[in-house]
Amino acid sequence: MTKEEHVKKILLMPIECTTQKSKNIFRYNGRIFSSQEYRGYDPDMSDFAVGFYKIVYNEILGEKEFLDKENLNIFCGDTMNTCKKIVKRINNSEAEEWYNEYHCLANFWLLPKHVGRSSSCTARLGLMQFSKSKRGIDDYVDKFLNNYKTHYIEYSRHFPVYTEKFTLENIGDNHFLEGSYCIGKDIISFSNNIKSINDIREKLEMRAEYIVCKKGIELYQFFSGLGIIE
């Protein structure tokens, strides 16, 4: 396999969180196992995912510590295509497959904490209208992007640093969505047409390939340093 193929394979590899307190990331039986400094056990905020964000979003994150509390309100890991809604659109055998594979780096991005990880605190702050999981968006990437585009001014009032980094002109490129979820500034609608798990897999494959084109060298070094290139 080429370096690019190794990187793409790991970007699509399922991730599980371990209960280990010390940092430990390893590969076993076609999966990545990772410790998690961030509270709870959520693969999109695992130590492995955090390392990924620091590399692919390095120009955006700058020198700030990613897990700094103030920074987390602006940039926090999120799973792009989740499980809850999609499994209702496909058959049971495919639903189990999707549940076992959807937590992977190619399916992770950064959103403001109260957008991607909304909670009771989000409601108390009156920010639920921006939640990616609210009714009508339901954690679908295309629906969220359309909502972001339509209500960009409102988003910019509440999340000014984020909207400064992810403008209507560059959000597709800065999130590595070109060709999979966007073509230039145009959003590719797909959520209403999902009939099979392969419809989502195709999106993840395309995003993984775009990430490899942009950040493949740095990611190969990161994965190699962790000893997960096989």
Image: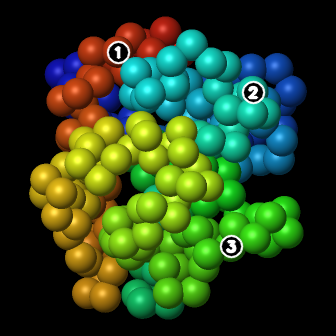
Determine whether label 3 and label 2 are within 8 Å by CB.
Answer: no
Determine whether label 1 and label 2 are within 8 Å by CB.
Answer: no
Residue 59, placed above or below residue 42 = above
Amino acid carrying mark 3 in the image: Met
- Cα separation, mark 1 vs mark 2, equals 23 Å
Amino acid carrying mark 1 in the image: Glu
Neighbours of disc 3 within 10 Å: few (<14), some (14-19), many (20+) = some
- Residue drawn at x 75%, y 33% as measured from the top left: 70
**203 relative position to 77: left or right:** left
Residue 228, placed above or below residue 208 = above
Residue underneath mark 2:
68
Neighbours of disc 2 within 10 Å: few (<14), some (14-19), many (20+) = few
Among the 4 quarters of the image, the one containing residue 146: bottom left
User: Along the polypeptide, which appears first: circle 1 or circle 2?
Assistant: 2
Q: Nearer the viewer, mark 1 or mark 3?
A: 3
Note whether residue 176 is visible: no
Q: Is 82 in front, or is 184?
A: 184
- Cα separation, mark 1 vs mark 3, equals 36 Å
Note whether residue 194 is visible: yes
**5 relative position to 82: left or right:** left
- Residue drawn at x 26%, y 87% as measured from the top left: 193
Residue 118, placed above or below residue 166 = below
Q: Is 204 in front, or is 121?
A: 121
Residue underneath mark 3:
128
User: Along the polypeptide, which appears first: circle 1 or circle 3?
Assistant: 3
Q: Is 160 in front, or is 108?
A: 160
Count of all numbered marks drawn on residues in the image: 3
Q: Quadrant of the C terminus?
A: top left
Among the 4 quarters of the image, the one containing residue 65: top right
**174 relative position to 39: left or right:** left
Instruction: Give the percent coordinates (x, y) of residue 53.
Output: 50, 31
